[in-house]
Image (cartoon, helix red, strand yellow):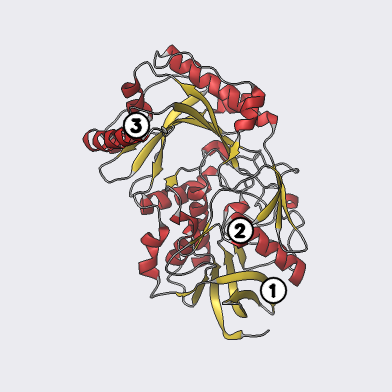
Amino acid sequence: MKNMSKKTYEITIIGAGAVGLYLANLLLRKKNILVLESGPKNHFIENDFRDKFKVKGIYKNGKRARGIGGTTNLWGGQMLPFMRTDFSQNNGWPLTWEEIKPHYESVSNKFLYESAEYESRDFIKTKSGFKIIDIQNPNFFIHVSKWLKDPKFKNIFFSKLKNIIKLETNCTVKNIEKYENKYIINYTKNQKNVSIKSKKVILAAGTLETLKILFNSKAKNKLPISDKLGEGFMDHIEIKLCEIFPKNRVKFLRLFNTRILKNKIRYSIRLSAKEFFIASQPFLNISAGFVIKTPTNIFKKIINNIFAFLSSFISGSIIKPFGIIELTIYLEQKPIRNRKVTIDENGTLNIQYKPCMEETLSAINFGEVILNSLYEKKLIKKSEIPKKNKVYDLMEDMNHPMGGAPMHNQSDKSVVNKNLELIKCPNIFLCSAAVFPSGSHSNPTMTVLALADKLAKYLLE
């Protein structure tokens, strides 16, 4: 126990990204909190060597950042809750929609300054001043996704927290061990080994970092962590399915492209599957949107930027005269046994992952539903979806790793309980997307923040 601190912390939060900063802010009433961050204090590091992993199959996981604010230094700030249908017994969630909804409301009010209404036409019209097109279709409905005015959590929280809580940066947590009625957290700082004691530990790092710490703690310190650790790993899929051809480009973009509200929060339009469609497929949640591909011609890029600025200033709608408009599918993946994470003797994560043809067929079927409906409404001309093998090749992960340490309504599949507490390791809590028993088509950030909101309330009580 070299360099062991004599002090024992009440709560230690591992990770000062979105979730770690939010938790620290919520738990300010608790004294004696320590936050450990693997990156630097005044800047951030992209794609650090500590983020490396090996892949069997196809998995990219995009860019990662270490530093105050974590990967929010790179993200766009999209906030979209999972849907009621996601929190089902079939999906393994031990939490119901009624249990999680108040925490979505809390997160929405704190970050977006409004209720968590994403589907209500009346609410959206009142807040934004525009109507959502009325398309009566049994397979999908139209709603919004919201984007933060300032997506960087360092800007939101750090100035408030830096003089109140103890924050250690450049700390790479290696493992956690049990010591009497508390825990020892072993980490390196400036190439030196350091150990600190804490009564409670919250792993608020990203999914893969959380799994790595747990694997190392189980192997080195014999923490009694479930053998299910690493199973059920998933992401969600993005597929730029096909080009569409609007009959009137300006009208189409006013209906379906991003809109900027007066408070600078953005709304983008989503077309999401109804229960009728989901039940007819392999029970995968799915949605679609329209993306304007950036033209390669510099002149067209400049014209697009000018039009986007003027149109958003005048009407709030972003209109771009150039660039292919693509129907883009966002697709849930089911957690299955042959998608998982393990660790080798060198401490490197090994990810076994690839899409499956069942998911491809769901994407094609949903794309056909969308295209046929818009064609019947005379909004687009006929479009062709590629063959299934081509669509399979277009499927990419969306940089949102989830699962691997799930809560679950079946105890033999659980790594944590519904309070996010590691089973057989009381007072170690996981607060990352690693605890999801299933995903959705949505960006997972808002759901992790809702779980953080729930966890903070549990700890304060």
Q: Nearer the viewer, residue 6 or 386?
A: 386
Q: Amino acid at mark 1?
A: Glu
According to the picture, the residue beneath numbered tag 3 turns out to be: 300
Disc 2, SS: helix
Residue that appears at 24% across and 35% down: 310
According to the picture, the residue beneath numbered tag 1 turns out to be: 177
Q: Position of residue 70 (x, y in %)?
A: 49, 59
Q: Is residue 198 above or below residue 274?
A: below
For the residues labelled 1 and 2, the Cα–Cα distance comes to 23 Å
Q: Amino acid at mark 3?
A: Lys
For the residues labelled 3 and 2, the Cα–Cα distance comes to 37 Å
Residue that appears at 47% across and 27% down: 326
Q: Amino acid at mark 2?
A: Asp
In terms of sequence position, does the residue under pointer 1 or pointer 2 come before the other? 2
According to the picture, the residue beneath numbered tag 2 turns out to be: 51
| Dot 3 and dot 2 residues touching (CB under 8 Å) | no
Q: Nearer the viewer, residue 121 or 229?
A: 229
Q: Nearer the viewer, residue 210 or 297?
A: 297
Disc 1, SS: strand
Disc 3, SS: helix
Instruction: Give the left or right position of residue 241, taking residue 223 as reference.
Output: left
Which quarter shows the N terminus?
bottom right
In terms of sequence position, does the residue under pointer 1 or pointer 3 come before the other? 1
Instruction: Give the left or right position of residue 303, taking residue 15 as reference.
Output: left
The 10 Å Cα crowd at callout 1, few under 14, some 14 to 19, many 20 or more, is some
Give the total number of marks visible in the rendering: 3
Q: Is residue 314 above or below residue 265?
A: above
Residue that appears at 54% across and 72% down: 11
The 10 Å Cα crowd at callout 2, few under 14, some 14 to 19, many 20 or more, is some
Q: Judge depth for marks 1 and 2 and give the one in front.
A: 2
